[in-house]
Image (spheres, rainbow, N blue to C red):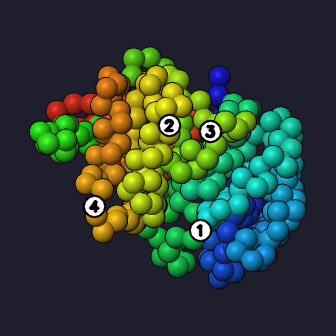
Amino acid sequence: MVILPKFLQKNDTIALVCTARKIDFPLVENARKHFENWGLHVIVGESATASFHQFSGDDELRTRDFQMQLDNPDVKAIICLRGGFGTARIVDRLDFSEFAKNPKWIVGYSDVTVIQNHILKNYNIASLHAEMALKFPIFPNTNESLNALRNALFGIFEPLEGQILRHCEGGTTEAIHNVHGLLRLTARNDGTTAELVGGNLAILCSLLGSSSEVDTTGKILFLEDVGEWLYAIDRMMTTLKRAGNLEKLAGLAVGQFTNLKDDKTSFGKSAYEIIAEHVADYDYPVIFDIPAGHCEINMPLIFGGIYEMSVSEKIIILRL
């Protein structure tokens, strides 16, 4: 049974860290103001203000800082400030023994997918895929993603709506009008209800064969990505399929694929069409355009949470 850390209460303490690329200090301070405005006490970790080439400190510093927050019993959530690259360089250096005894929320997305899948696979502990400080509006302004992060930290989640695609002649796909999907967080585990796993597609592929590899059997798989070539999306989906990670899903929830690139000679398909093609032979439900990922509206998801995926002529929901 997956362990969900306790949701936050006012006056709880959180820690701000960077596990990957460095972040400008004004953005760290901006995040601190938002969290303190929510009634939380904030520890600014050493990695949040460090710099080592493109990283937020060298591997030793980032490991030491994250380990300190894992082991600190007063810290109820570790907030990763941004992604980039670097988390995989430190994950095997970390000791999760104290964290396993006293689970806390690890919050982020993108490169943080490494740690989120590692703790779910090895310790059965859930994490929160949600907006990071790099994209917070300037305090005191707010937006939908930031409000959703606040709600999620305190245990409030909204259903997420998507759409269904169908195959058409010529190998293309289109949305089925008036047929939508809903993904909803739930306490039940029956029917089309299952544990949600996943994260950034490129990171998930990079974890194959490691101790952090995602287990997709009987799960709802969530995917998102940014800045990739369309042929690379096809290659990564082919990799997941050949590795057996697409065959036995309970469902597939596809988030936002943004800032994608194509060659002068076009690949000929959109990211959603590529994904739809790779799962066309399977009979589980698939919904696209979930508002989560590298996008303006990045709604929170619990990796390890039990979600209901429902489909009707009027609405499809991904709901916790």
Residue linked to disc 3: 208
Marks 4 and 2, how far apart at CA: 23 Å
The secondary element bearing badge 3 is classed as loop
Which numbered disc, 3 or 1, marks the residue that appears first in the sequence?
1
Within 10 Å of disc 3 (Cα), the crowding (few <14, some 14-19, many 20+) is some
Which numbered disc, 4 or 3, marks the residue that appears first in the sequence?
3
Nearer to us of marks 2 and 1 is 2
The circle on residue 133 is 1
Residue linked to disc 2: 240
Which numbered disc, 4 or 2, marks the residue that appears first in the sequence?
2
Residue linked to disc 4: 266
Q: Residue at x 48, y 46 (%)?
A: 236
Q: Quadrant of residue 298?
A: bottom left
Which numbered disc, 2 or 1, marks the residue that appears first in the sequence?
1
Marks 4 and 3, how far apart at CA: 29 Å
Question: The residue under label 3 is which amino acid type?
Answer: Leu
| Disc 3 to disc 1: CB gap under 8 Å | no
Question: The residue under label 4 is which amino acid type?
Answer: Ser
Question: The residue under label 1 is which amino acid type?
Answer: Ala
Question: The residue under label 2 is which amino acid type?
Answer: Leu
Q: Is residue 303 above or below residue 231?
A: above
